Amino acid sequence: MANDHAFWTTLPLGRGVTLLSRDVHGLVAFNKPAGVLSHPNASGDEPRALLQARYQPEGEFFEWRNEGAAAGEVSRLWLLNRLDSATSGVILAAASAELAAEIRAHFKRKQVRKVYFALVFGGPHAAADVWRDRLAVEKRGGRIRTTAHAGHVPAECAMAVVRRGAQEPRLTLLRLEPRTGRSHQLRVQCAKRGWPIVGDQTYGDFARNREFAKRAGTKRLFLHSRETAFAYEFHGRRAEFSAVAPLPEEFEKFL
């Protein structure tokens, strides 16, 4: 499927999902809007997911039947990483199980560079910093909750200020490059320092979120997966892959 034009042009993309880049091996990056699920979590979730197709959690792939395909033939696309539904931006998939295994191994070995942009209330005085914390990650009733108190899981992130707002309440656009991949890491690290991400309904400032939502007309989480890049080898060939998702307009609108 890697170079099958019909396959790539007939993907059952979810609402607002766009294809950012694709390489010769079948590695692909999508731009996922806020509110879209990385994959269906339950029956009936397909219309809200990255692809409007059945998802097989055991193999972590989407599966669907293309119109005009041969009898019994199905198409598959393997999901490589996930974003919370409230987070927008780059998300990766692969056209074969073999390629998916290779790229997932890269993620496990922390050989993938990921950059996020976040709009926060307030903001740091320093133009750049490296955040190091010890987090506690728990599963409660099927949901993940992370705290920055009494934890033992190391979390590290490089922070840089992109732009400071002049309006009130003061907002700051941050560039965040996590060097570890903990659940909800960036949201918790921002909140711990007193700069919660705008629209964060779990770790954020609920009063300021309500005020901002009234003024802005949106309740979205202002966290965006901006860039993903890495090098890998497949079938003896070295490849460089990168994808950049445009920053949503609302991120700069209130600065």
Image (tube, rainbow, N blue to C red):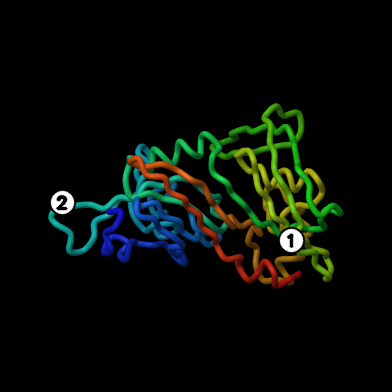
Q: Amino acid at mark 1?
A: Val
Give amino acid for label 2. Answer: Gly
- Most distant residue in the left direction: 71
Query: Where 154 falls versus 187 (above or below)?
Result: above
- Report which quarter residue 216 is drawn in: bottom right
Q: How crowded is the residue under tag 1: few (<14 C-alpha within 10 Å), some, or many (20+)?
A: some
Q: Mark 1–mark 2 contact, CB under 8 Å?
A: no
Which x, y percent locates residue 203? 71, 47
**Where on the picture, by quarter, is residue 249?**
bottom right
Q: Relative to the observer, which residue lies in front, 193 or 226? A: 226
Residue at x 70% of width, y 38% of height? 156
- Between label 1 and label 2, give the one nearer the viewer: 1
Image quarter (top left, top right, bottom left or bottom right) of the N terminus: bottom left
The residue at which mark 1 appears reads as 162
Instruction: Give the side of residue 4 with respect to residue 91, left or right.
Output: left
229, 115: nearer the viewer: 229
Indicate the position of residue 66 as horizontal and vertical percent values.
Answer: 24, 60
What element does badge 2 sit on? loop
Mark 1 vs mark 2, CA separation in Å:
51 Å
Question: Neighbour class for label 2 at 10 Å: few (<14), some, many (≥20)?
Answer: few
Image quadrant containing the C terminus: bottom right
The residue lying furthest to the front in this view is 237
Label tally: 2
| Residue indicated by mark 2 | 72
Label 1 sits on a secondary structure element that is strand
